[in-house]
Amino acid sequence: QKEVEQDPGPLSVPEGAIVSLNCTYSNSAFQYFMWYRQYSRKGPELLMYTYSSGNKEDGRFTAQVDKSSKYISLFIRDSQPSDSATYLCAMRGYSSASKIIFGSGTRLSIRP
Amino acid sequence: DAGVIQSPRHEVTEMGQEVTLRCKPISGHDYLFWYRQTMMRGLELLIYFNNNVPIDDSGMPEDRFSAKMPNASFSTLKIQPSEPRDSAVYFCASSHGQGRANEKLFFGSGTQLSVL
């Protein structure tokens, strides 16, 4: 079993829809949770990060962490065609020396 | 800053040949990471350096893979001999590791490696 599980998609939604992307994990030592966005033929770029449980909002994006369920989510409101990309969840333990483990990514397409 | 710079952008080689991938991290970043991305396995960490010193190379798949960081502004990942199963996109990333900043990885655009 992988430490981090993510549905690969693809996920296709119409412009303006609310998008929900999710990951589950098995390692209870994970404390930092990140979402990276990767456009085609580019490297991933950090979108949001949160520490421990709770919500964090940044514009149209909301990251949610439920440590009791080992489940994290990224919500995109008012989705735009420019949001079409692969979204990778990532997480690591408390120590700055702990490795960042990535999910396999969910491919998202927003239809105009 | 130009960001993390990787070269070459694409590499096509024949099985058995030596391949060298290059990376220039962002100036001032003290962590450097090499990742490999495939459809089957996703993004896998191969090795990472802190202040030019290799810290964890447990992700390096075999002895055919080696990585060096001779100075703070340059790193190489070498595959010798290359095999078709090494075909993947190889990413270099850097970060500034103080405090909680280590999760903010800055990735290069990657090297698409095809081994025929």
Image: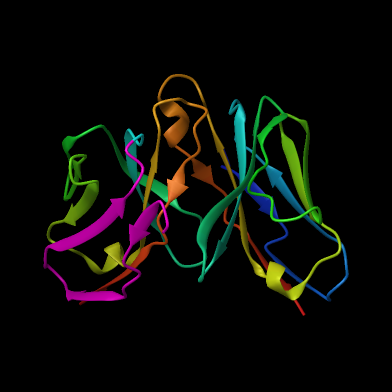
- In what quadrant of the picture does the C terminus of chain B appear? bottom right
Left or right of residue A92, residue A50 in this image: left
Left or right of residue A44, residue A27 in this image: left
User: Toward the viewer: A18 or A98?
Assistant: A98
Q: Position of residue A68 (x, y in %)?
A: 18, 40
Left or right of residue B17, residue B54 in this image: left
Q: Which residues are magenta?
A: A1-28
Q: Is residue B45 magenta?
A: no
Q: In percent of the image, x 78 and y 71: which residue is there?
A: B83
* In the image, residue B75 above or below residue A14: above
The part of the image, by quadrant, that contains residue A34 is top left
* In the image, residue A88 above or below residue A67: below
Q: In percent of the image, x 26 and y 69: which residue is there?
A: A81
> Can I make out residue B101 in this image?
yes
- In what quadrant of the picture does the N terminus of chain B appear? top right
Q: Position of residue B84 (x, y in %)?
A: 74, 75
> Can I make out residue A42 in this image?
no
How many marks the image carries: the answer is 0
Left or right of residue B53, residue A19 in this image: left
Q: In percent of the image, x 73 and y 59: which residue is there?
A: B8
User: Most extreme residue toward the front, as rendered?
Assistant: A1
Q: Position of residue A52 (x, y in %)?
A: 25, 32
User: Most extreme residue toward the top, as rendered?
Assistant: B99
